[in-house]
Amino acid sequence: MIPVRMMRKMVWERSMNKLSRGLSSSQIRKPRSPSLVSLDLIDEWSSSFTRSHSHPIQKSTNNDTARIIDGRSAAEEIKSSIAIEVSRMKESIGKVPGLAVILVGQRRDSLAYVRNKIMACHEVGFRFSIAELPESCTEDAVCDALSNYNKDASIHGILVQLPLPQHFDEGKILNVLSLEKDVDGFHPLNIGNLAIQGREPLFIPCTAKGCIELLLSSDVEIVGKRAVVIGRSNIVGLPTFLLLQRHHATVSIVHAYSENPEIITREADILVAAAGVPNLVRGSWLKPGAVVLDVGINPIVDPESEHGYRLIGDVCFEEAVRIASAVTPVPGGVGPMTVAMLLLNTLEAAKRALCFT
C-alpha cells in the first residue's frame, strides 16, 4: 500500500508534468523579482532635501536648550579602562593588542580618521601598523596586504579604511579579511549575525556600537521608542538600524529616495543622522524633545581655520539645540566614540586570540 504522503507527491508531480506540457515556454509565468544587486542605487541626496521646509519649528518643552552629549569624555573613560587592560596583558603574557589599517588613496577625511586611530592606539598601548596604497593600485594589491595581516600573529584587528575608490569591489575585498580580525564588523557573517535574533556577531560595527553606547550612558530609553536612521550605508546606516532593532526600538530608515523625509523624522524619539550631507537635518525635521545623534563629519572651507577647513555635521546644530532634549556635537560627539569602540573590539580580538581573561 502506497503511503498517503507519497501518493500526494505523485499526484502533484503528474499534474505539474501535464501543466508544463500544455504550456509553451513563453506562457510559463516567471517570477518578476529581479536580483537584489540589480536594484542597488547610489544615494544621491537632491538639493531640495537641504532646504528648510515650511513646517513651523516647535521648541522643546523640557529645556531652553538641549543637553550636549559629550562623546569625548565618554570615549576617554573607555580608553582609560582599555589602557589598564593592555598594561595587565603586557605584564602577564608580554604581549599587547595589534591593529592594522589598510589605506587606499589620499581622501582628506580618511587621512583624518586614520590619524585619529594612530593617536588612539598610542594612547592605550596598542601596536599599530599601516599599509598605504595609491588610489591606482589593484584589488589584488589590497587583498595581498590583507592576507599578510591575516597571517601576522601580532596583529589582532584589521580594518580597511572605507570608502574605497569606486573601481574597487568592497565585498570581494572584505571577504578576504579574517573573520576573527574583522574589528570593524563589516564581514558578511558579522552583519548577518547582527541581523538574526539569537545570534551574536564577533564584532559590532564601531559607529553603530558607539551610538548605542552614547544612548545607554546618557540614560536614554531605547526599548519601544521610535527611532529613525537617516542614511543606509553598509558602514553606518544599516548596522545602526539593525542594532537599534536588537535593542527593541521601532526603527525606520530615511534615504535619498524617501518621500517627505521630514514627516518621518518628526516622529522620531531617537534620530541618527548619517547621510553625509552638511546641515541636511533642520529644526523643522525634529520632534520636540527628541534625542539626536549626528554621525555626519563634513569638511567645509574655512580660511580662518588652522587646516583651511572645519567640520560640521548632518544636523543644523544651532536649530537642533532649540528643539531636541539632547544632541551630539560635531566634532566631539559620535566620532570619538567610534574610535573608542574600535579599540574595544581590538582588545576583545586580542584576548580571544591569546586566550587572555
Image (cartoon, rainbow, N blue to C red):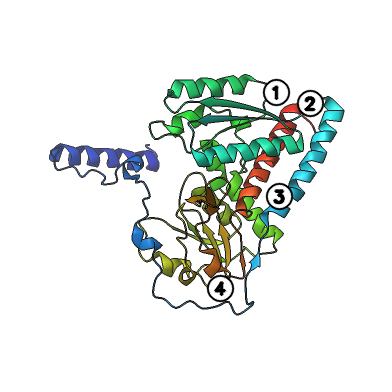
Q: Earlier in the sequence, mark 4 or mark 2?
A: 2
- Asked if residue 184 shows in the view, the reply is no
What residue is at 45 percent from the left and 33 percent from the top? 171
Q: CA distance from mark 2 to mark 1?
A: 8 Å
Q: Earlier in the sequence, mark 1 or mark 4?
A: 1
Assign the N terminus to one quadrant of the image. top left
What residue is at 71 percent from the left and 58 percent from the top? 217
Q: Amino acid at mark 4?
A: Ile
Q: Amino acid at mark 1?
A: Ser
Q: Identify the disc placed on residue 95.
A: 2
> For the residues carrying marks 1 and 4, which lies nearer the camera in this image?
4
Label 1 neighbour load within 10 Å: few <14, some 14-19, many 20+: some
What residue is at 73 percent from the left and 31 percent from the top? 97
> For the residues carrying marks 1 and 3, which lies nearer the camera in this image?
3
Residue corresponding to mark 1? 154
Residue corresponding to mark 3? 75
Q: CA distance from mark 1 to mark 3?
A: 25 Å
Q: Amino acid at mark 3?
A: Ala
Q: Position of residue 299 (x, y in %)?
A: 50, 49
Residues under numbered marks 1 and 4 in contact, where contact means CB atoms less than 8 Å apart:
no
